[in-house]
Image (cartoon, rainbow, N blue to C red):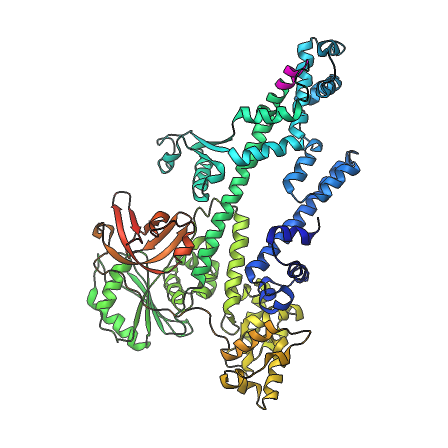
Amino acid sequence: MNVQSYIQSRAQLPAKSIKNTIALLENDASIPFISRYRKEATGNLDEIAVEKIAQLLSEFNELEKRKVAILKAITDQDALTSELAGKIEKSSSLTEIEDLYLPFKKKRKTKADTAREAGLEPLAKILMAQNTNNINRSCERFISDKIKSKKDAFAGAGFIIAEWINENTYVRNSLRRLYSQTAQLKTKWVKTDTEHPEATKFKQFEAWQEPLRRIPSHRFLAIHRAANLGIIRIKIEVETQKALDIISRIIIKKIGFSGVSYLETAIEDAYTRLLKKSFSTEFLNEAKEKADAAAIEVFASNLEQLLMEAPLGSKRILAIDPGFKSGCKVVCLDAQTNLLHNQTIFPHPPQRKIEPASAKIKSLVNAYKIEAIAIGNGTAARETEEFIKKVYLPKDVMIFTVNEAGASVYSASKIAREEFPNYDVTVRGAVSIGRRLSDPLAELVKIDPKAIGVGQYQHEVDQTRLKEKLDMVVMRCVNKIGVNLNTASKELLSYVSGIGPGLAQNILNYRKENRSFKSRKELLKVSMLGAKAFEQAAGFLRIRNAENPLDNSAVHPESYFIVEKMAKNNNIEPVDLVGNFKILEQINLEKYVSEETGLLTLQDILKELKKPGADPRKKKRPFSFDPSVKSISDLKPGMKLPGIVNNITNFGCFVDIGIKESGLIHISNLADQFVSDVNVVVKLNQELEVTVLSVDEEKKRVQLSLID
């Protein structure tokens, strides 16, 4: 199977789109560049489709690499036949080629090896052939110094047959179908509450049983975590008799054969000693992979929604990291989010210096012409919000509560130390809160996505796959929005198509030496940034107030000549074409179609000329929680409250209702009809009105509903 047919069978995309996308990927084009600037070649595939092709291309290459290794290993044993080589080369499944390799895989000495050394393989072949009328007479010639009795001879031959059955691809595929349809996951309690501190959390899995193919990913990962902690033991099982019947139908050809009982013994041994354990491991691993994939998709979806959250934009911000005993850390930022001032106020117990704190806030708002206040949503958030709203401030000062998840991780990071070497973690944390209000994406790229806390069981899933997926999501978001070349941090630049950390640092070095970039062409003066990196990156970088207004747009430099031609045909300068709706609406794009530039690209250019560098994100607006609810003790069933979705899982979503504990809307309470996908009903950071269903103060649990 070639790479194109492999991908097409799994992605159901047009053959031409796949072929051209593969060529671009193999030529080191990035996914954002391909989906944005090579639409004619891909047939207008979006980033998700291009990501899928890239993933399948990587899978195919890994499969081919494994085939080469297996063919070499079998060749080295002088055991490769043309038939076997053909099967391996034609296979499109890693499981299939591993089954074909199984008889040749090096393993420690087995019972079958000992039986072969005793000369019992011919007896095993006689039993498998099922042609002799008297198997006991056939067995007599195998009695020797090593084999003292017929019983020993049949037992040894049985071990060889069991190994053959275990290595039989038809048997394995038949059992694989049985497992995929009927396998049950079962758990057994190993450690009691007193033996393990986390045992209570997993009490429901004390004696759990569920069809493996139906178990939701979040439950499987919970069970898997409990098993990893040694609290429970997991088994994957099918009905033994059904498995034995399947093997018997394949192995036993003659019912009246005199050696049937010996074959049945070998079949039972093959299943209970070899196959059962092998398939239990295989299906457990497969279930883990599926659960990982589902959890990673949830995390990726949440992260994308969080990164694409509405920014407030270039405003002068006063940010507060609230606290009780240690006080509230206050910072003032200019419109470019540079730190201007920091200090601590104590409006809450135990110090409760309300008047000095109020006077200080008023003074700072006036002195730094503050336009918005950002309050972190951690400890003392509601009390701080209430305090700020009582301070007499200009009416146009907006007040926001900002999700501060991961801010403490940032404040103690190397990145934060490099940005603010002369300030402690409390100042850095407050700055991060303010910057998140101004531009969530630009600030969140500095934090490991796992620390943001918008997934489920993120520490249980495959960490390599999780990082790859999350990095892809961050790159997608960064390039969708575009990056200001003269203000972006190293971390933000690192995610730009074709850049990476090394070139990002070189860009910063150039910016420091030359104060700023005046044009996109200047990028070619950056150390190590060649034509290829320029091609991949330029369209995603923006230069405000550039001499050429196209440098602040998503129009790629390779297409500037088209804009110049459009301007010339309308007897105006290119600069006068940008934003000129009257002329742009009259342009006939068909006149500019060529072999190099298709209609799809021209439509993108025209759209960008109408609104150059437009941010696809919505604008931030203030939100207020119910002022009467400050803690879980204030909640009563039936209350209707405003809230913000702060996490989405496969089983429901969590909602911030302005108290320390987030409430859960179970998937069954999202709508008055069946919901299979939580993301269809709600999105991260969506504002909702929820109804309180139940409150458990002892366990700190709040159940909410969207159903009226």
The location of residue 408, given as percent across then percent down, is 39, 56
| Residue 122 seen in render | yes
Indicate whether 21 appears above or below 616. above
Is residue 216 shown in magenta?
no
Is residue 260 shown in magenta?
yes
The location of residue 694, given as percent across then percent down, is 26, 47
The location of residue 328, given as percent across then percent down, is 29, 62
Q: Residue at x 47, y 37 (%)?
A: 228
SS assignment for the magenta stretch, majority = helix
Side of 486 relative to 597 (left or right): left
Q: Residue at x 36, y 57 (%)?
A: 645
Give the extent of the magenta segment: 258-264
| Residue 421 seen in render | no
Indicate whether 62 appears above or below 166. below
Side of 220 relative to 386 (left or right): right
The location of residue 211, given as percent across then percent down, is 47, 35
Q: Residue at x 78, y 33 (%)?
A: 79
Count of all numbered marks drawn on residues in the image: 0
Name the image quarter holding the C terminus: bottom left
